[in-house]
Image (spheres, helix red, strand yellow):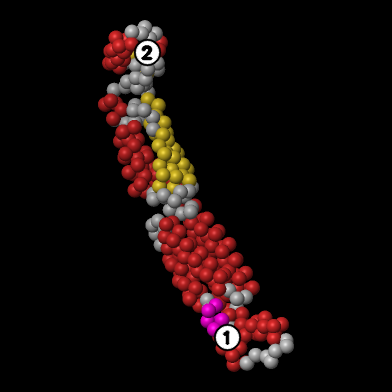
């Protein structure tokens, strides 16, 4: 979900520049830097952005250079009169000297620039071109993020292939058979039975079958296969898939942890650990998807 887009525009009233930067995020987090006088655009900007994107930390910046802006400072008479009335009221209660003129001029709103006092009608006439360019900006960012998304999807499909390979290797591992478990059981009990009468072969086979049943991984392996198929379908489809893949990652981890806990052979345990590494890499890249 990383990306960057920049767009410049102008008309007879002003020049402007839109910028938008996108970073990874579980939800949609917008940070706006809009110049004074254009704050009324924020609700529309948020609504338009939310209609394009569902995830990501987006920083949106607008710079506006008005041709008719004046740099000379001017006094806002209404604000000054209100401040002076407040000062008079305070003096009457506290019997204190009046503040110096330079202190009064520092009060926010008393001193303004010509740009801050431009005609509201002129400011409103900028709304449509600014919003039109902002929509174009979102489309450019969408293209940028889509290209990255395609590269990530290719990587994720490779990770899914690795999961399939590891799942199959566990499924085919000979250590999961009852005969293999029986041989390991005999080897483990041999030191304890050196001076004994030996084991009943039928009883030994029965115990091996019970252990094999408890350690059976067929259900977990089948669910892993189903989850891999579901992930491939999501990656091949359209629309946001990040949150759904997050959930599938949790299911991957759940099945993998169960496999490792039920494993009765080094080869299966090693394959389960390799699987956990692949799942972690898969989940890291899923955070980059819409």
| Residue 214 is inside the magenta segment | yes
Q: What type of secondary structure mainly makes up the magenta span?
A: helix
In the picture provided, is 151 more to the left or to the right than 109? right
Please say whether residue 34 is visible from this viewpoint: yes
SS type, badge 1: helix
Q: Earlier in the sequence, mark 1 or mark 2?
A: 2
CA separation, marks 1 and 2?
Answer: 93 Å
Residue found 55% across the figure and 73% down from its top: 262
Picture mark count: 2
Please report the residue visible at 40 percent of the width from the left and 47 percent of the height from the top. 28
User: Looking at the image, is 59 positioned above or below residue 81?
Assistant: below
The span shown in magenta is 210-215
Q: Which residue is mark 2?
A: 104
Could one spot residue 154 in this view of the protein?
A: no
- Residue that appears at 41% across and 39% down: 31
At a point 55% along the width and 59% down the height, the residue shown is: 281
Image location (x, y in percent) of residue 146? 45, 52
Instruction: State the image coordinates of residue 174 (x, y, percent, origin top left).
Output: 61, 81
Q: Which residue is mark 1?
A: 207
Q: Nearer the viewer, mark 1 or mark 2?
A: 1
* Residue 249 vertical placement versus 213 (above, below): above
Q: Which mark is residue 59?
A: none
Q: Nearer the viewer, residue 103 or 287?
A: 103
Res 241 → quadrant: bottom left
């Amino acid at each position: 979900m990383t990306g960057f887009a920049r767009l410049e525009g102008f008309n007879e009233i002003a020049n402007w520049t839109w910028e938008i930067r996108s970073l990874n995020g579980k939800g949609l987090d917008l940070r706006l830097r809009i110049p004074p006088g254009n704050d009324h655009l924020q609700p529309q900007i948020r609504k338009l952005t939310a209609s394009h994107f569902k995830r990501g930390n987006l920083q949106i910046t607008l710079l506006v250079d008005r041709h008719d802006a004046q740099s000379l400072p001017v006094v806002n008479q209404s604000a000054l009169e209100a401040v002076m009335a407040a000062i008079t009221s305070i003096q009457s209660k506290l019997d204190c000297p009046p503040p110096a003129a330079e202190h009064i001029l520092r009060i926010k709103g008393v001193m303004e620039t010509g740009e801050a006092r431009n005609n509201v009608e002129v400011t409103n006439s900028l709304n449509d071109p600014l919003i039109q360019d902002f929509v174009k900006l979102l489309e450019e960012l969408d293209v940028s993020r889509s290209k990255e998304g395609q590269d990530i999807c290719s990587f994720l499909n490779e990770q899914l292939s690795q999961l399939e390979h590891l799942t199959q290797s566990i499924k085919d591992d000979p250590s999961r058979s009852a005969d293999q478990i029986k041989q390991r059981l005999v080897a483990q009990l041999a030191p304890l039975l050196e001076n004994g009468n030996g084991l009943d072969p039928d009883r030994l086979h029965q115990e091996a079958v019970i252990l094999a049943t408890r350690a059976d991984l067929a259900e977990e392996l089948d669910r892993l296969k189903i989850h891999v198929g579901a992930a491939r379908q999501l990656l091949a489809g359209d629309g946001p898939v990040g949150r759904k893949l997050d959930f599938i990652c949790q299911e991957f981890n759940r099945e993998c942890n169960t496999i490792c806990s039920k494993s009765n052979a080094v080869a299966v345990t090693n394959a389960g650990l390799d699987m956990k590494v692949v799942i972690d890499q898969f989940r890291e890249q899923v955070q980059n998807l819409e």
